[in-house]
Image (spheres, rainbow, N blue to C red):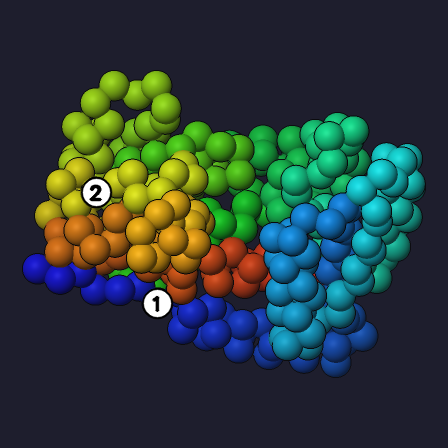
């Protein structure tokens, strides 16, 4: 058996095509979807993420605003900008790129964003709405995973789903989304006993721990759908420094039925769903 690849690049392009059409329709009604991004510090990875988000906006006909601050900026300056953007009716989404410098209270920053413009879906009010099954904004990476499962016609209702990772950004919301579609969900983490016992039961396996190739082929149920959210780099060997996921792709692809690669899998969908959330926010202003 060789798994079929779920191509995140192709699906992302398809979804963004639809976003461009929606943006054009909104503009005809006098609304230009707008995403504001705040970047604090000089973390190279964060700078790349922000650049890609801004570029994504522009390519889909959306407006983007970028605010860059030095690492030692006073938090009050950033809070003041967030308050200004909250009050600006022309801005539909606000995103503060994480991680923030150590002198920032990240939770307080995220809570300062209006829940109606929290397109990352991290505000406590939006997290609660997701828990209740009535989300305003779905966190972007889990949203992208659900879109990938939908695109492949993966049956979720009644499936055994195992999520490896319990972060607020991916693991927990991922579990809630799968549960909302009637999967039986198990969440595993660093203290789970016999991880392989759980992963081998999974019809749908989502790996989101940030540990290089920790899920190997012998830990996967034959024919399972394997979603690799990890974004790591090979620590050694001939591929040292190159991107890899939480799943050992080479051994997993011979067991799984469907699998996402790294790169080219979940990654492209994350930014695409951020744009989708921003679009949905803009559309709500006309309702």
Image quarter of residue 114: top right
Q: Nearer the viewer, residue 237 or 231?
A: 237
Q: Nearer the viewer, residue 100 or 8?
A: 100
* Quadrant of the drawing holding the C terminus: bottom right
Q: Position of residue 258 (x, y in %)?
A: 22, 57
The residue singled out by tag 1 in the image is 7
Secondary structure of the residue carrying numbered label 2: loop
The residue singled out by tag 2 in the image is 216
Secondary structure of the residue carrying numbered label 1: loop
* Quadrant of the drawing holding the N terminus: bottom left
Q: Position of residue 206 (x, y in %)?
A: 33, 43
Farthest residue, direction left = 1
| 131 is higher (above) or lower (below) than 280 | above
On residue 144, the disc is: none
Q: Residue at x 11, y 48 (%)?
A: 222
Q: Residue at x 64, y 77 (%)?
A: 59
Residue 88 located left or right of residue 127: right
Q: Residue at x 13, y 51 (%)?
A: 255
For the residues bearing labels 1 and 2, Cβ distance under 8 angstroms: no
Residue 228 seen in the figure: no
Labels 1, 2: front one: 2
Q: Nearer the viewer, residue 280 or 232?
A: 232
Q: Position of residue 61 (x, y in %)?
A: 68, 76
Residue 237 located left or right of residue 160: right
């Amino acid at each position: 058996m060789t798994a079929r690849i779920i191509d995140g690049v192709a699906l992302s392009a398809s979804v963004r095509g639809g976003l461009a059409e929606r943006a054009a329709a909104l503009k005809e009604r006098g609304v230009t979807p707008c995403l504001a991004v705040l970047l604090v510090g000089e973390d190279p990875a964060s700078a790349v993420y922000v650049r890609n988000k801004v570029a994504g906006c522009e390519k889909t006909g959306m407006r983007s605003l970028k605010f860059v601050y030095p690492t030692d900026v006073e938090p009050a300056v950033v809070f003041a900008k967030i308050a200004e953007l909250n009050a600006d009716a022309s801005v539909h989404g606000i995103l503060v790129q994480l991680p923030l410098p150590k002198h920032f209270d990240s939770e307080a920053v995220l809570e300062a964003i209006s829940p109606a413009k929290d397109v990352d879906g991290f505000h406590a009010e939006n997290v609660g709405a997701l828990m209740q099954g009535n989300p305003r904004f779905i966190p972007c990476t889990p949203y992208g995973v659900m879109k990938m499962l939908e695109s492949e016609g993966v049956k979720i209702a009644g499936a055994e789903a195992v999520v490896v990772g319990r972060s607020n950004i991916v693991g927990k919301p991922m579990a809630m989304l799968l549960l909302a579609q009637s999967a039986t969900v198990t969440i595993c983490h660093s203290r789970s006993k016999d991880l392989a016992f759980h992963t081998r039961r999974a019809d749908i396996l989502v790996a989101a721990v940030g540990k290089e190739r920790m899920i190997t082929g012998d830990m996967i149920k034959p024919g399972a759908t394997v979603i690799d959210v990890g974004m790591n780099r090979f620590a050694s060997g001939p591929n040292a420094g190159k991107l890899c996921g939480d799943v050992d792709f080479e051994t997993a692809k011979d067991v799984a039925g469907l699998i996402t690669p790294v790169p080219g899998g979940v990654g492209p969908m994350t930014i695409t769903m951020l744009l989708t959330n921003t679009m949905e926010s803009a559309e709500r202003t006309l309702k």
